[in-house]
Image: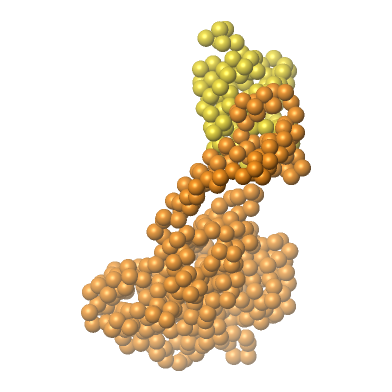
Amino acid sequence: MARKRTKASAAGAPVTTVVVMRLYVAGTAPNSVKAIANLKAICRRYLKDGYKLEIVDVCEHPRRALTDGVVVTPSLAKLSPAPASNVIGNLSDTGSVLAALGLHAGAME
Amino acid sequence: MNHAPPARSPSDLTAEAAFKDWIRRLVKGAAELEALEAGQIDAVMDAATGSAILLPGAQAALQGSSRLVLSALEALPGEVCVLDAAGTVVMTNKAWRAFVVARAGAGLGVSEGANFLAACRNAGAPERVHAEAVAAGLREVLAGRRKLFRCEYVCQFPGGHCAFTLTIAGIAQDGAVHAVVTRENVTERKRARLARGSGRAKTSRIAAVARAGTPNRLLASLPAKEYERLLAGLELVKLSYGDVLYEPGEQMRYAYFPSDCLVSLLTVVEGHRALEVGLVGREGMVGSRLALGITVSPVRALVQATGMAVRIKSARFLQEFRRSPALQRALFRFTDALMIQVTQTAACNRFHVVEARLARWLLMTRERLLSGEFHLTHEFLADMLGVRRAGVTAAASALQRQKLIRYQRGIITILDQQGLELAACSCYRHPQVMGLEAAT
């Protein structure tokens, strides 16, 4: 997918770090609902306004999920800042989500 | 539909194991497998089919929530059906099905699996006009040209007539447009409204006028009391394509209020073809010269789109006109608009190119008929625009090349309303005719 890059990120020197994520879910299935709730709680607590989250429903857009290399849902992909990483499951393990997002619970609080 | 879960047979268990095995093979990564074992996975992507495979837990939950939506739809008192992009009925609710059973499939009572557009095409003669309008509206919605279409129509059943309000709304689904159709029976409400305070009027006449479906905007603008007084003198008529209502120099025996038909006013000059100078639809009245106290028609009034109208005897009209200030105001406003239209048409015929005039004429027809599709021959259009047939053919081809209209076997379909407005000369929308703004 073509994505606009800002001048700052193109130069590799972002002024403020915005975490860009994409969460793949399956409609309103139980783990998907939990993943959305867990991720939103984590974002509220640790990222405040410094994040962008896109939620993709694989039941509606299966082709897109396949193109993005998604194998199972729920699945969270951190797209930026580099390095890209991902977490599988309902995101109830806050520690591993923070690690994947490049955050550390202690440092951010 | 609450079924008890079936007892699991050994073959079910084998199938379950095979399903799990298959899922494990699709899920390759270690983290993915770990999450799968922990029961944290809802769906697995299958590249072979390009779809998401829901695991049993997720499937049950999603089915549960869609069942709830379906139950809600089912319980709605209004009649609802859902159509796919081709117009085929994919879902109906209880009220809709009850209607279909009660009316034995007549009157756009379409069952699941049947095609709504085909039902409109095959509608019986009495509801044909309305069915065509509904089909045109549905096509507009399915093509994504409009989000909502609403109309009133009337059906004839063995037990009498029923009036309906029908709404078609587009729903975007998998890159295509589907539609949800809701229908409400408004017969009782309509009868009650018409019956109020008009004791002298015969019930059959009220029913007949109520049957007209799409009301005439000029009549609709009258206060209830004055409308009801007029109603006693009104009678419902069907005007067919080609009918001549007046000839120049003849007495006008009736005044006509078109509902969903369209009447052209033509000037006949000796030695030449007739030329259209005005167009009257649901916004006005044919025979408005009566309001000026003159009972002889200066023009030929020719029906150019079949539909219903109500008419009133000229003497009766004059009698009501004298005692109804609201009717006077409405008529003066309409006569003024018509006069401007006639003046504008005269200038337009002289100064503008055929293509722009054709675009304007199609737009004017569309807003009066509430439909983007109409039956017209080149011959007829040539008369309307006062040009030779070849000129119309060239202009229609030019508009077709720009993908603004489609012209097939005498049926013109407006494909791009905005584009056509740009192609039309400035005479379109000048002036704004009262009564046409609200429903376009």
Chain A, hue in figure: yellow
| Outermost top residue | A107
Going by the image, does B366 lie left or right of B412?
A: left
| Outermost right residue | B48
Residue B316 in picture, x, y percent from top left: 31, 86
Going by the image, does B437 lie left or right of B222?
A: right
Color style of the picture: by chain
**How many numbered discs?**
0
Chain B, hue in figure: orange
Q: Residue at horizontal 59%, vertical 67%?
A: B114
As drawn, B145 above or below B250: above
Q: Nearer the viewer, residue B255 or A43?
A: A43
Q: Nearer the viewer, residue B216 or B364?
A: B216
Residue B231 falls in image quadrant: bottom left
Q: Residue at horizontal 32%, vertical 68%?
A: B189
Residue B62 falls in image quadrant: top right
As drawn, B175 above or below B110: above
Q: Residue at horizontal 56%, vertical 85%?
A: B242
Residue A100 in picture, x, y percent from top left: 65, 18
As drawn, B362 above or below B402: below
Going by the image, does B41 lie left or right of B185?
A: right
Q: Nearer the viewer, residue A103 or A97?
A: A97
| Outermost front residue | B10
Residue B148 in picture, x, y percent from top left: 51, 57
Q: Residue at horizontal 41%, vertical 56%?
A: B76
Residue A7 in picture, x, y percent from top left: 70, 22
Residue B421 seen from this side: no
Residue B367 seen from this side: yes
